[in-house]
Image (spheres, rainbow, N blue to C red):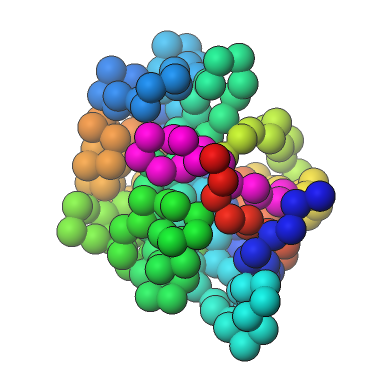
Amino acid sequence: MTEYRFFGRERVTIELGGSFDPAALALPAGLSHDLAGGRARIELFAFHVDGLQVRSVPLARWSYPELLWRIAVRRGDEPAWWVIACDLAARGPRWAARQYVRYDVRPNAVTVTEQRVGSRGPLGELAIAIAGHSAMTRERAPARTLLVSRDASWEVPWGDDPEPAPVTVEATIERDSLSRATLGDAVVWDTHASLRRGREHRCGVARR
């Protein structure tokens, strides 16, 4: 059983998929794009966590928004995510994400609420309006291994229980100069995303 080093509660979690030209982004050795209709796939995993704690450091608690850019890849026959960037402004969590989780962290200004997802920094801006909350639950994709670091040689244990079930929401891209700067191609984003409230946040230390 995995002992997670970081744990808390996410007030809101939003996942939005999109596609881009696979030729625009070279992958680390041993990985290939997990294509859909000939297109590479990306998923934004955005959350705002409250009261994040670090195991063995009981006095450390943080609340902050974070946005992960996850590329759908295959490592041999195994489906996985490769985190190409982590947008995170809060200084303490940013240090921990780089040191222990080995994310490629960018100190962007991040917003994650039930109405908006955004990331803004020197490379550009992504602004997404969220609306049309539905009571209809959304089917979750199968779990994937989470690969991190520039060469994707590290894995991160990541807890993700089936509850709370995600609901479907509408996602409208208002501005996006950041996806091309991140991936080498402008992303064609999906028009609907999934939203969860109260997801338990559990993240371990990266390991080879």
x, y percentage for residue 31?
Answer: 45, 21
Which residue is pictured at 54% across the width and 40% down the height?
Answer: 208
- How far across and down, in percent of the image, does residue 60 sit? 58, 83
Image height of 95 relative to 157, above or below:
below
183 part of magenta stretch = no
Q: Residue furthest toward the top?
A: 38
**Residue 131 in picture, x, y percent from top left:** 54, 55
Residue at the front extreme of this rendering: 208
Q: Is residue 154 magenta?
A: yes
Q: Is residue 99 visible?
A: yes
Residue lying furthest bottom: 59
Q: Relative to 158, does residue 208 appear above or below in the rendering?
A: above
- Quarter-of-image position of residue 140: top right
Q: In the drawing, does residue 108 fall left or right of residue 114?
A: left
The answer to which quarter of the image holds residue 179 is top left
Viewed as shown, does residue 57 lie left or right of 98?
right
Q: Where 182 sits versus 198, above or below?
A: above
- Give how far across and how far down residue 67 sits, in percent: 45, 55
* Residue at screen point 50% across, 59% down: 100
The residue depicted at 67 percent of the width and 76 percent of the height is 56
Q: Is residue 130 visible?
A: no
Look at 22% across and 42% down and name the residue there: 181
Q: Which residues are the magenta region?
A: 147-160
The total number of labels drawn is 0
Tell which of 147 and 193 is nearer to you.
147
